[in-house]
Image: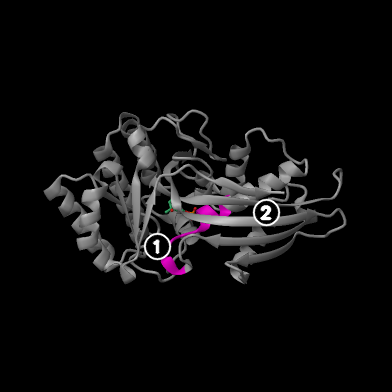
């Protein structure tokens, strides 16, 4: 090994993100079938601390992984597989002794997917280790972190930037790539304070994982039309983002959410992740919007929970609506009030 032994500690807080145009379908080594764009959140986040040493004689990597203070073999195996999978690009990995402590700001059983925030936090820590030990220079740090986050979980690639991020090659986004996400900085200010109330409909584990869902797109008869549609909708959305057109943004967000779940329903085998209360909430949101004119919209990720999207200026009105009509449909009245935020922050480096 060319580099001397090295040790230290680094920690990152990384938020989750909500895609407006969805990534659904992948190929090769974690490459997307279409471009996607997301809002970076703030309240739903993962804190990850990595204490490490790079030991020339170690036949590793050696991992001690703790989630919320306890060993968690399923996560640990996933991280270990991930470390092996990126060893070709980070040659210190076979010599790495790594102690990882990770925790989420949202309850573990909230039904919220944590792979975006947790894999992005992990990738940021690994990039810190690479820089500190001389395997990487600091240029394009976030882009490299996004690349490594993608290799852990596709949606994680978008969590490393503030406000909005796009992943996947698209003719209307300069520098866009399938290999990493890029920040999208042309959105009007209204989108930088957009709310996302995550309304918990079920805390049960999903019957079909996202990874399996992506796989099912390979034989989905509508797949190629869907990929074309996603790219077209992204062009449309960029226009709405730049011009501050909230209703158009909201319409695309809802269309995308329903298309995502439509793809699941026409996969073979078909499956459904929406619950009765998901559909009831959608009805109430659409009716309330129609009757009140308040700009409130929904999105869904690959699960039954509703993401309620609205600009800050209508927050007071929406809060009454949520209290009266949405909270009673949530598991134990549980809602995570989130908002677009400033992206990850480094907690410690020693
Ligand atoms: C519906 O990123 O969780 O949230 O790459 O297999 O880890 P893997 O999948 P994942 O898929 C997320 C899909 C989605 C849409 C999105 O975030 O774009």
x%, y% of residue 254?
28, 48
Point 78% across, 60% down: residue: 60
Of marks 1 and 2, the one in the foreground? 2
Asked which secondary structure carries label 2, the reply is helix
Tell me if residue 248 comes above or below residue 256 in the rendering.
above
Point 72% across, 35% down: residue: 137
Span colored in magenta: 109-120
**Badges 1 and 2: C-beta atoms under 8 Å apart?**
no
Q: CA distance from mark 1 to mark 2?
A: 29 Å
Point 40% across, 45% down: residue: 340
User: To which residue does mark 1 refer?
Assistant: 268
User: To which residue does mark 2 refer?
Assistant: 85
Q: Is residue 245 visible?
A: yes
> 134 or 61: nearer the eye?
134
x%, y% of residue 82?
65, 56
x%, y% of residue 316?
24, 49
Tell me if residue 118 comes above or below residue 204 in the rendering.
above
Q: Is residue 206 visible?
A: no
Are there few (<14), some (14-19), or many (20+) residues within 10 Å of tag 1?
Answer: some
């Amino acid at each position: 090994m060319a580099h001397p032994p090295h040790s230290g500690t680094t920690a990152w807080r990384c938020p989750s993100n909500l895609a407006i145009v969805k990534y659904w379908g992948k190929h090769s080594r974690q490459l997307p079938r279409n471009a996607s764009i997301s809002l970076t959140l703030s309240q739903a986040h993962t804190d990850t601390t990595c204490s490490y040493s790079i030991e020339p004689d170690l036949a590793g990597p050696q991992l001690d992984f703790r989630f919320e203070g306890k060993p968690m073999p399923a996560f640990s195996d996933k991280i270990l597989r991930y470390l092996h999978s990126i060893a070709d690009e980070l040659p210190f990995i076979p010599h790495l002794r790594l102690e990882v402590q990770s925790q989420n700001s949202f309850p573990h059983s909230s039904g919220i997917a944590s792979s975006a925030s947790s894999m992005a936090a992990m990738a940021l820590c690994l990039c810190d280790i690479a820089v500190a030990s001389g395997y990487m220079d600091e240029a394009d740090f976030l882009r490299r972190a996004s690349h490594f986050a993608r290799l852990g979980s596709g949606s994680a690639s978008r969590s490393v930037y503030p406000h909005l991020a796009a992943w996947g090659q698209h003719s209307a986004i300069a520098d866009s790539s399938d290999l990493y996400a890029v920040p999208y900085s042309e959105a009007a200010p209204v989108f930088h304070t957009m709310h996302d109330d995550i309304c918990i409909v079920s805390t049960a584990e999903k019957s079909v994982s996202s990874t399996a869902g992506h796989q099912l797109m390979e034989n989905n008869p509508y797949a190629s039309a869907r990929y074309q549609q996603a790219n077209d909708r992204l062009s449309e959305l960029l226009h709405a983002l730049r011009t501050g057109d909230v209703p158009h943004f909201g319409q695309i967000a809802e269309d995308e959410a329903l298309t995502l779940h439509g793809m699941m329903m026409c996969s073979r085998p078909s499956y459904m992740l929406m619950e009765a209360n998901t559909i009831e909430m959608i009805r109430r949101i659409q009716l309330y919007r129609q009757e009140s004119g308040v700009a409130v919209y929904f999105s869904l990720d690959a699960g039954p929970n509703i993401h309620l999207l609205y600009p800050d200026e209508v927050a007071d009105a929406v809060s009454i609506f949520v209290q009266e009509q949405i909270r009673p449909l949530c598991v134990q009245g549980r809602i995570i009030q989130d908002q677009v935020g400033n992206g990850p922050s480094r907690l410690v480096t020693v």
